[in-house]
Amino acid sequence: MRLDYQGLLPETVGFLLLPRFSMMAFFSAVEPLRIANRIAARPLFDWTLISEDGQPVTASNGMTLLADCAIGEVHHLPSLAVCSGFGPEQALSRPLMAWLHRLDQANCVLGGIDTGGFLLAEAGLLDGERVTLHWESLPAFQERFPGIETSDELFELGERRFSCAGGAAAMDMALEVIARRHGSRLAIDVSEQLVHERMRTRSDQQRMSLARRLGIHNRRLVEAISLMERHQEVALPLSEVARRSGLSPRQLQRLFEQTLGTTPREWYLHLRLERAWHLLRESDREILSVGLACGFTSGSSFSRAFRTRYGLSPREVRRQAAD
């Protein structure tokens, strides 16, 4: 999705479909392009579906799409979107890496939708770039690729790279591309056809604010939870959480119990275990390393708390993710 595209119309966009890709994100990226063609009454965009071997690809929802061609049949594209979902690194192979590098050398603009950034990073194609992913996948990406700048924006559109958080964010990115290529009026018309309330900018938050997400309005409680979310690897003492939130430990306890029906300690533990769940499923870090990254001081304490919370051991969750 080149920002400086000067080629003939229609502009061709390649979509590399990998096993268990996000169907919603894919359709959210394609449909605005289709509608733009209809409203403009001429073919502004075209797209081709690519799989590694040219065979149909099954998405994470169980639906299967036919591919137009295999990677070996594609030698030039203005832009390519890597579409993946759960366990993206499992799809990376030497032929696929070599193909991505050949496209890059041929000035193809490469991007990732949802977790597609994992594959581009593994291929060494995101050095010096800024990338966004779905908020659930960002912690695992940051752990695996600490040298790559990340953001929690809805999408990133650079000169040679692009990325989006998946889901509806792919629609917002496609609308922005239409606006940059063919004017904001067309993008607005497409957005209205999609019954998309408004065109969100890249800086719109992926997630609702804490207050809206949890249905809470106490400013100090929101600050306490925000502190917990920001300090998971090295957990803050609850006395420090209370102090920074302008509360006494007793007030903090009371607020959690009255508003959320739980204790600050239980809430903090839940956040850390939730992060561990995502790291186990979306990264290949050793289990002990995952526990340490989520504020646990030993493998036994991590496994015990994890099993109590989820009814499964960390090893069992890792095994499920690999299946």
Image (cartoon, helix red, strand yellow):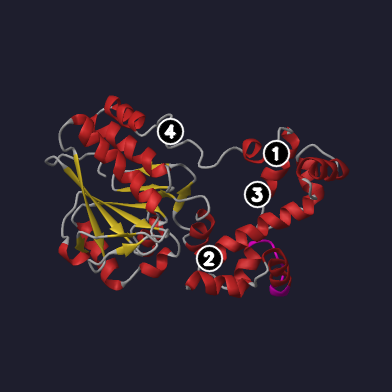
Please tell me which of labels 1 and 4 falls first in the chain. 4
Would you say 127 lies left or right of 14 here? right
Percent x, y of residue 29: 33, 45
Nearer the observer, disc 2 or disc 3?
2
Q: Amino acid at mark 4?
A: Arg
Q: Amino acid at mark 3?
A: Glu
> Dot 4 corresponds to which residue?
200
Please tell me which of labels 4 and 3 falls first in the chain. 4
Please tell me which of labels 2 and 1 falls first in the chain. 1
Viewer-proximal residue among 210 and 48:
48
Q: Residue at image x 62%, y 40%?
A: 213
Q: Which mark is residue 222?
A: 1
Please tell me which of labels 4 and 2 falls first in the chain. 4
Would you say 90 lies left or right of 219 here? left
Vertical placement of 67 versus 192: above or below?
Answer: below
> Dot 3 corresponds to which residue?
229
How far is disc 3 from disc 1 in space, using C-alphas? 11 Å
Magenta-highlighted residues: 294-300
How far is disc 1 from disc 4 in space, using C-alphas? 25 Å
Residue 298 belongs to magenta span: yes
Residue 82 belongs to magenta span: no
How far is disc 2 from disc 3 in space, using C-alphas? 19 Å
Tell me whether circle 2 and circle 3 mark residues in contact (CB < 8 Å).
Answer: no
Q: Residue at image x 67%, y 43%?
A: 226
Vertical placement of 128 versus 169: above or below?
Answer: below
Please tell me which of labels 2 and 3 falls first in the chain. 3
How far is disc 4 from disc 3 in space, using C-alphas? 25 Å
How far is disc 2 from disc 1 in space, using C-alphas? 28 Å
Q: Amino acid at mark 2?
A: Arg
